[in-house]
Image (spheres, rainbow, N blue to C red):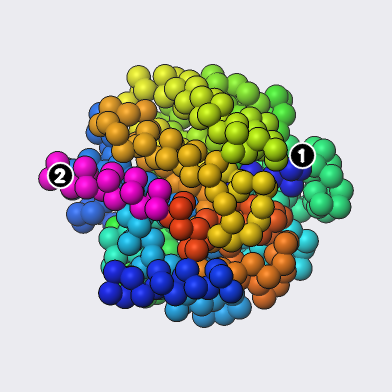
Amino acid sequence: MMNRFTILSTVAASLLFASSSCSNAGKEGQAATEEPSGFVTIKDGSFYIDGEQYKYVGTNFWYGAILASEGRGGDRARLKAELDSLLAMGIDNLRILVGGDGPDGVPTRIEPTLQPQAGVYNDTILQGLDYLLADMERRGMKAVLYLNNAWEWSGGYGCYLEWADKGAAPIPSRDGWDAYNNYVKHFVLNDSAKQLSYDHVRRIVSRTNTVTGKPYASSTAIMSWQVANEPRAFSNEGKDSLAAWIRRTAQIIKSIDPNHLVSTGSEGKHGCEQDIELWTRIHSFPEIDYANIHIWPYNWGWVDETTIASGVEKACENTHDYIAEHYNAIHAAGKPLVLEEFGYPRDGFSFVPGSPTTGRDTYYEYVMSMVRDSTTAMLAGCNFWGWGGLAKPEHEMWQRGDNYTGDPAQEAQGLNSVFACDTSTIAVIKQLAIDNNNRRNSHK
């Protein structure tokens, strides 16, 4: 998610509870050689599982590994209720952060972090990731796991540059976005910082799950490893280096785990200095299995605080055009296109769970219909941002001890989150997701 600072038994029981809550390590190259059933594969520009086409409506659940841990921030009872609720809605694909990086206590950064120092890991969070993946595998759910971040809210680029002795990373809320952008543009140009990121990739992808006893490479819960959240060059001078870093990271992943897909995490041309040719080149690499885009109508100026409801038709038109441009650019390569981040604010720019969402509901229905309605649709999948579920925000900006929502620490809590008490939005998601699943199952 890019920075937007400027700006029915048990399942039924969990959903009922949700509504009321709102009102109140191995070695590189040693991968599994036998491919069990249940992996996501690609044929003729579509996803498949065991020979059946897999099109999905999913969500972003960045805090999943923290919630699944037994340490600070962990809540396995809530995790179970959230996964039950999501499955009841037809959601079986979750995009999850494998991070963050750097010390705790940095304003606008999530915590606890996974990698507080370069190469030093919080085993509690790693075991939380193990638990989450084991539970998802048991439920037949799929995870897209992103391994880095261009933005400050989980450390990412900035922390790797600090560890490579480039000085202290600016904090956007204090130092401004220009200072941050001018600092992190050095990441794709800095060999030491990139090497540290490769070390992290090797460490995670080669891991053996402590719950199942199986290598991650054998987990059917994993759909895709992802290079980073919204990787950018942050300068025209760094565009070739961005492409090379993405490809090298993908090559490392494939050398350890040939069983799973690899994706980029890109926003599309918006994250490629508005260069659709760069985005197409990156997604044409043989190591990149499918294409990603993100769309943020409010952040990109398609609507403003006063036109969230009245301007949704224009937002949908622009969304169609953005998707079509990228689909047309990559379709000939036979690679599926996924809109893996999209969000839309509440009416009146409210952050309050359960407050009106007429604009959001219309926008969600439009996007999700593009997955459901045709086997030849441009989108092979989508993940809305993001699932807030049972969370009850306590402060406008996240503070230590608060519930995790779909909004990371640098954003107003409730800005883009879908909470379990957002009944009209949940109805839209459920109808579109379950309709899509029924169509998927009807072809079996």
Considering depth in this image, is 244 or 62 the residue closer to the camera?
Answer: 62
Q: Select label 2 or label 1 by which is in front.
A: 2
Task: Using the rendered image of the protein, determine whether residue 408 is visible from the camera's viewpoint.
Answer: no
Position of residue 262 in the picture relative to residue 401 (left or right): left
Position of residue 373 in the picture relative to residue 249 (left or right): left
Considering depth in this image, is 438 or 272 the residue closer to the camera?
Answer: 438
The amino acid at mark 1 is Asn
Q: Which residue is mark 1?
A: 181
The residue located at (64%, 67%) in the rendering is 393
**Where residue 122 is drawn, which disc sits there?**
none
Count of residue discs:
2
* Magenta-colored stretch includes residue 66: no
Tell me whether the residue at label 2 lies in contact with that at label 1, contact meaning CB atoms closer than 8 angstroms: no
Task: Using the rendered image of the protein, determine whether residue 420 is visible from the camera's viewpoint.
Answer: yes
Residue sitting farthest toward the right: 175
User: Magenta segment range?
Assistant: 427-444
Give the mark, 2 or 1, whose residue is nearer the N terminus. 1
The residue located at (33%, 70%) in the rendering is 12
The residue located at (46%, 53%) in the rendering is 424
Considering depth in this image, is 34 or 107 the residue closer to the camera?
Answer: 107
Q: Which quarter of the figure has residue 312?
A: top right
**Where residue 442 is drawn, which disc sits there?**
2
Screen quadrant of the C terminus: top left
Q: CA distance from mark 2 to mark 1?
A: 48 Å
